[in-house]
């Protein structure tokens, strides 16, 4: 196996949990003569930690003789610790990973266990081939997606109604809203990653070019990057959004932000507070020009599960993976906290139990409505170096340290260099 370039996850906070494995089919209880300990790692908030631990306990009840060691923490610092774990081959047996980590940690496809070889224990029939393809690398199934994700436009309809504004559909609508709100509210506030996606959508629609091509090469030239940088400056100057460094999620709750851009899977964490405060929240169309040939918006797996290439217990790890993705027990505990499940058995259970409702489901349906025009995100698009270079160039142009043309050339060179290094 080639040396891994980076890592998988493992987090602070460790405890022993029980677990369970079954899908929408009949639950099977297994017995083992000796106790087998496997580890499970994930990141998330207290809510996610609580239900995942409960799931672990249920899995153990159904599988006497298997103990699951749970490792979890907040996202902060997670990837740094992951690098250490992967390099030292001490990563968890079953781990929650980011989609971009397949390319980063398994460039040759050997960084994670090939789940296809464990199909006797993981029910792959719950997934469409297009879903499975997200986790394929060099003919090996490195990971399976939990849910699909896309950047979504959330609008505080109550505030828009107060200004006599319709929910925005086009770029002109967004700038018209900023003019009407006149600095009292931001019509569509974005953080640094959301800003990148918003700028890319605008530049792709304007130029007809693709930011990063399917083969990982750069599709934008200096001119397209200049378009992005000019657009960012215009967003700030017009009062559409604060500078990304000053974005604060809590301002969605208070109504300071009359709209925001966030992942589908983050619907509750970004806009749940606004709903609790009595605001009506709506899902807007993906901002575009009328009749634009390219939508410029992307989908990706929200998160994924993978099995360590170094696991001593591939069968038991596969049983746990199947439970986490396909079982009614996990679907009941998790609901839509990680997004609308891709697994057909998990989704069928949620539909039967009346849990496919609410803001996140509305965002999911909006994504499905436009899925034929949306592209699959390049794993490189969320690269931290690229994000930093984009933000540096945005600030350089905003503070008049560079012209948009100069910034575009610099950004082109920096992003192109990053992509070349990643493809080596």
Image (cartoon, grey):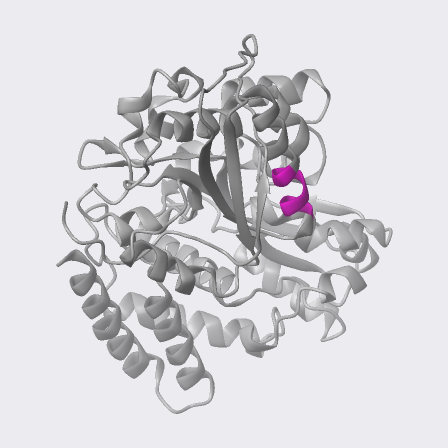
User: Which of 218 and 23 lies nearest the eye of the viewer?
Assistant: 23
**Image coords of residue 162 (percent x, y):** 83, 58
- From the image, which quarter does the C terminus lie in? bottom left
**Image coords of residue 262 (percent x, y):** 57, 54
Q: Main secondary structure of the magenta part?
A: helix
- From the image, which quarter does the N terminus lie in? top left
**On screen, residue 255 above or below 407:** above
In the displayed structure image, the side of residue 286 where residue 254 appears, left or right = right
Q: Is residue 24 magenta?
A: no
Q: Residue at x 40, y 21 (%)?
A: 122
**Image coords of residue 268 (percent x, y):** 69, 47
Q: Is residue 48 magenta?
A: yes
User: Which of 386 and 197 lies nearest the eye of the viewer?
Assistant: 386
Q: Residue at x 85, y 54 (%)?
A: 277
Q: Residue at x 24, y 71 (%)?
A: 412
User: Which of 221 and 260 lies nearest the eye of the viewer?
Assistant: 260
Q: How many labels sit on residues?
A: 0
**On screen, residue 198 above or below 330:** below
User: Is residue 129 visible from the viewing direction of this image?
Assistant: yes
**Residue placed farthest to the bottom in the image?**
401
Q: Residue at x 30, y 31 (%)?
A: 133
**Residue placed farthest to the top in the image?**
26
User: Is residue 211 visible from the viewing direction of this image?
Assistant: no
In the displayed structure image, the side of residue 116 where residue 19 appears, left or right = right
Q: Magenta part of the protein: which range?
A: 47-53
**Image coords of residue 340 (percent x, y):** 57, 33
**Residue placed farthest to the right in the image?**
278
**On screen, residue 396 above or below 281:** below
Which quarter of the picture shows residue 295? top left
User: Which of 193 and 281 lies nearest the eye of the viewer?
Assistant: 193
In the displayed structure image, the side of residue 70 where residue 337 appears, left or right = right
């Amino acid at each position: 196996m080639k040396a891994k370039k980076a890592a998988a996850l493992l987090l602070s906070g460790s405890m022993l949990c029980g677990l369970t494995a079954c899908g929408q089919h009949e639950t099977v209880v297994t017995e083992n003569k000796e106790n087998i300990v496997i580890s499970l790692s994930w990141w998330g908030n207290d809510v996610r930690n609580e239900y995942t631990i409960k799931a672990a306990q249920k899995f153990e009840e159904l599988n006497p003789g298997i103990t699951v060691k749970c490792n979890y923490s907040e996202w902060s610092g997670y990837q740094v610790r992951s690098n250490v774990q992967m390099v030292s081959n001490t990563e968890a047996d079953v781990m929650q990973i980011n989609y971009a980590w397949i390319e980063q940690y398994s460039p040759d496809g050997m960084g994670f266990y090939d789940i296809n070889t464990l199909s006797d224990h993981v029910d792959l029939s719950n997934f469409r081939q297009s879903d499975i393809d997200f986790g394929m690398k060099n003919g090996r199934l490195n990971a399976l997606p939990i849910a699909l994700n896309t950047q979504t436009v959330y609008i505080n309809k109550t505030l828009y109604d107060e200004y006599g504004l319709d929910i925005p559909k086009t770029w002109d609508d967004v700038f018209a809203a900023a003019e009407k709100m006149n600095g009292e509210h931001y019509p569509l506030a974005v953080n640094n990653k959301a800003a990148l996606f918003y700028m890319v959508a605008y530049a792709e629609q304007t130029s007809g070019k693709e930011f990063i091509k399917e083969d990982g090469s750069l599709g934008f030239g200096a001119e397209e990057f200049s378009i992005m940088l000019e657009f960012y400056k215009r967003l700030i100057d017009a009062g559409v959004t604060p500078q990304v460094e000053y974005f604060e999620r809590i301002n969605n709750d208070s109504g300071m932000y009359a709209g925001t851009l966030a992942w589908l899977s983050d619907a509750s964490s970004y806009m749940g507070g606004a709903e609790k405060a009595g605001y009506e929240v709506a899902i807007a169309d993906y901002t575009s020009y009328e009749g634009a040939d390219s939508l410029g918006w992307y989908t990706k797996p929200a998160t994924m599960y993978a099995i360590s290439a170094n696991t001593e217990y591939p069968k038991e790890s596969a049983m746990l993976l199947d439970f986490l993705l396909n079982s009614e027990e996990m679907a009941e505990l998790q609901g839509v906290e990680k997004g609308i499940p891709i697994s057909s058995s998990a989704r069928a259970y949620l539909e039967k139990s009346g849990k496919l409702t609410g803001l996140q489901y509305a965002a999911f349906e909006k994504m499905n409505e436009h899925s034929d025009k949306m592209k699959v995100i390049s794993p490189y698009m969320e690269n931290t170096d690229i994000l930093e270079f984009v933000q540096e160039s945005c600030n350089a142009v905003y503070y008049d340290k560079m012209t948009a043309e100069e910034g575009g050339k610099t950004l082109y060179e920096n992003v192109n260099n990053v992509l070349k290094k990643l493809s080596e």
